[in-house]
Image (spheres, rainbow, N blue to C red):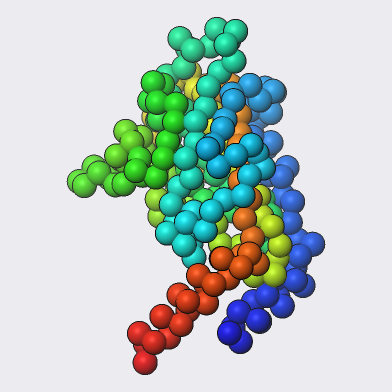
Amino acid sequence: MAAARLEAFIGRLLSSQRGRDAKLLTRATPAIVKLKPSLIVTSPLGEAPAPLLPAHSQVGANEVPPLSWSLPADSDLLPQIKSFLLVVEDPDAPLPSPVVHGIYYNIPPTKTSIDNADFAPVEGKGNLLSGGFYYGVNRRKIIWGGPKPVLGHGVHRYFFQVLALSEELKTGSSIGKEELGQLLEGKVLAWGEWLGTISLESQEHFRILLTRRREYRAGSD
């Protein structure tokens, strides 16, 4: 409990350190900023900004929230789309740049929705996932680093940014956000986003967090 109180104290001290929106992929990449968002990205969790569930966080089951996306009915871009890219970032962490929680690329053009079942690794296939696409490098270097904002820091926003591309991203290894700027040049047809929010101050999140810490301490005795 003392550790949680200290974390919450530090979180409150840093509460003004947030809002790095200008450094999000869709705000900072020349290949994207010239385009207005036109992809319609939705989730059964609700209209953005919508609260994420405890199961989507690192203190819960660390599941990826379900998403769907589509083009407007009058769009003529569909035949040109060869892949989709999904990048999830938190610009509200008290750090100089947004935290990358997930990068997923070469999503097939026929696939316009995802859920947690799509993110299981395919054995012996490197960074290929069961949904038929690949994962890149996030902050924790795992498939999905669910939300876990600092206690006391308030509500964090998670930008689920979906890009429609005219080509697959050709890369010999797992890619990070730093490589995306160059890789996306001349390939972005459209983009859109959905926002999820979370705060560990919620009663349910805090209960799960304390329970896990007690279990960890009991196991180390």
- Can the viewer see residue 172 in this picture? no
- Say whether residue 67 is left or right of residue 151: left
Residue reaching furthest to the bottom? 221
Residue 55: percent from left, percent from top = 47, 56
Q: Residue at x 29, y 47 (%)?
A: 121
Q: Residue at x 56, y 65 (%)?
A: 205
Residue 28: percent from left, percent from top = 67, 37
| Image quadrant where residue 161 sits | top right
Residue 186: percent from left, percent from top = 55, 20
Q: Nearer the viewer, residue 58 or 34?
A: 58
Q: Residue at x 61, y 68 (%)?
A: 203
| Image quadrant where residue 189 sits | top right
Q: Nearer the viewer, residue 51 or 81?
A: 51
The quarter in which the C terminus is drawn is bottom left
Q: Is residue 189 above or below residue 45?
A: above
Q: Is residue 65 above or below residue 86?
A: below
- Can the viewer see residue 197 in this picture? yes
Tally of numbered tags? 0
- Say whether residue 14 is left or right of residue 59: right
Q: Residue at x 41, y 80 (%)?
A: 215
Residue reaching furthest to the right? 16
Residue 79: percent from left, percent from top = 45, 9
The quarter in which the N terminus is drawn is bottom right
- Say whether residue 160 is left or right of residue 120: right
Q: Is residue 32 above or below residue 219?
A: above
